[in-house]
Image (cartoon, grey):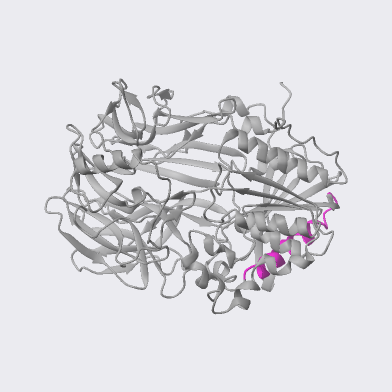
Amino acid sequence: MAKQKTLSIETLWQIERAGTPSLAPDGAQAVCALSRYSMQENSAASSLWLLSTRGVAPRALTQCGDKDAQPLWSPKGDLIAFVASREQQGAKDDTPQLYVIASDGGEARRVGNVATGVDAFAWFADGRRIAFVSWVWPELRGQKAQEKAYKAFKARKESGYATSQAQYRHWDSHLPLGRVPHLLVMDVASGRVRDLFEGTPYELVRADPDRNAFDIAPDGKRIAFAFDGAGEKRAGNCFALAEIEVGSRRVQTLAHDAAWNMGAPRYSPDGDRLAFLANHQGLKHSMPAQLCVWDRETGGWTVESAEWDHEVHAPLHWEDDGQALLFTAEQHGRQHLWRFDLPDRRAEVVVPGGTVSGFDKRAGTLLTVAHAANHPARLHVHLPGAAARRIEYFNDRLLADVQASRCEQRWFEGAQGDQVQMWLHFPPGFDARKTYPLLQIIHGGPHAASGDAWHYRWNTALFAAMGYVVCSVNYHGSSGFGYAFLDSITHRYGQLEMQDLDAATDMLLQEPWADAKRVFAAGGSYGGYLVAWMNGHAAAGRYQAYVCHAGCFDWTAMFADDSYTWHAREFGAWYWDSPRQVNEQSAMASAANMVTPTLVVHGALDYRVPDQQGLAFYNTLKARQVDARLLWFPDENHWVLKPRNSRLWYSEFFAWLKAHDPGMKPAARPRRKSQT
């Protein structure tokens, strides 16, 4: 038997990543995008793969492109459409375009040429048309005018971004200047395009308008979509649902309530009902998305999951009989695939997590893609009366000789006497007779969760492989534990969360294998905020060192972020109305108490937590003469996505912990080229 090795950053980036699959109409085959990364080239590529649900080996469908994505099988099963930027017949795509390829292989064909690009799309049931999203200049008429405007914009020499919009950037990019997301229809045979929203005030959501922003009726005559009816678009506005007739382009509002935010519409198989998600913003901004159904006969809508204390995730998928829907939802650190029966409003787990990240169902065949703490994404087919069966083995050979780490969940008493969950990840070959350093990994959100999941940017298996017992606490505010638990931190950030994190540390330090002199904590985004908060509130010496990635430091200065319209709801006041209320929840307020060495990481393209937050934290530590180190990326956003930057991130992370670990020899710093 070959000697096993521990997981490394090099191996992590060799893993091939399977995307959400699309099933053929007969359920016999599926297609998915498979992404590969090159550490040498510092790049990513994706191609489409055909997968059999009946035991035939997978095979590559596309090979000529390098960013083939979003594959969808046509309703007739003869074509697979996808989005890509390619070079074909001497013409190179400036923007992503729609391509189709025969389902049995061959050459892919570009369909039309949309100057403003093709984003998310869906097939009409006739298989002759698609509806898609594109960012267009709303005042212009016709595709020739759009093409002319795009060429002029591309050729401009000015770099300034001038706007009067309240919502102008999102995550890591500015919204296309002067453009809005419209819904268009393309004829697949001819490539002719028609803008359904042209000349109307309608547009789709500006924050990542994806496939969940609209749905096509089974008869192809109407398309449902979510829209913001406010005069000024801003994050946090409530959306309504409308329906547009494809022929006449007449729009009818289906569901609207100023207190409810609606989205992710899906038609029932007969087209007479529309399932969608809605959350009651009139009660509180943190209310969960619930399953709702609009009825064409009555014109009314009902909240079907009102008594089910879970947040429903898109996409929604109707069962063929129209009596139930499939969707994913979190529960206690896992994400399952659920079936919700409408007649008795009962939810049951269909496929348990780990983390079910995608699924599709056709002709009675269910296909899921799921990952867990001990393995990356895998695809399984689920047939009636049969056990789940894997249909690919993309990474098995790569990981065959990698020694796995053990993961287990524990519960403990946290803040307010509540039961709090945490995940423990043990180093490979863990021996309870030995002692180990303890590493708290603190999730962001705050309304997210540490789960039974495979994470590439914060991989707990890799942390454990470096010799740490890794603890991930689902502190108060985390999702998947009921609404009261999630909302408990509102208007008092930092308090209950730290009590939970401290209680977890206290409990683990009772273990004979835990070394009290080798305790560390690291977190990203809101988890980075909690690290900064802990630095000013935890007893000196309790933690030997911290890592703060993209962390919030000063909630007033955070007004530079892309979600500033939420601040008063989160903190209980605008900073100009109650500076004290906001400041008391800022980590900055306890700067005088900060003494623990901290590695601060931030990206310049981070608009969710602007990099001045990390720089201000780092500068504060340096001004106070606290041991600190800065890792700043000019070309990364809220996440570190490039392979080489990720390798640098991990090497700096581990070197920092080792440099402050009395039980380990400091790791060598990554070499840097000399500056001239």
How many numbered discs, if any? 0
Q: Is residue 499 magenta?
A: yes
Question: Foreground residue, 492 or 550?
Answer: 550
Query: How far across and down, in percent of the image, does residue 491 sit?
Result: 58, 73
Query: How far across and down, in percent of the image, does residue 638 sit?
Result: 56, 49
For the question of whether residue 422 can be seen, the reply is no
Q: Would you say 523 lies left or right of 194 here?
A: right
Q: Would you say 444 lies left or right of 599 here?
A: left
Q: Is residue 601 magenta?
A: no
Which stretch appears magenta? 493-513
Placement of 567 over or under 128, stated as above or below: below
Query: How far across and down, in percent of the image, does residue 520 sit?
Result: 77, 52
Residue positioned 25% across, 34% down in the render? 113
Residue positioned 41% across, 23% down in the render? 60
Quadrant for the N terminus in the image: top right
Question: Foreground residue, 559 or 191?
Answer: 559
Quadrant for the C terminus in the image: top right
Main SS of the magenta part reads helix
Question: Foreground residue, 400 or 147?
Answer: 147
Placement of 127 over or under 306, stated as above or below: above
Placement of 429 over or under 531, stated as above or below: above
Residue positioned 55% across, 26% down in the render? 41
Query: How far across and down, in percent of the image, does residue 135 sit?
Result: 31, 47
For the question of whether residue 93 can be seen, the reply is yes
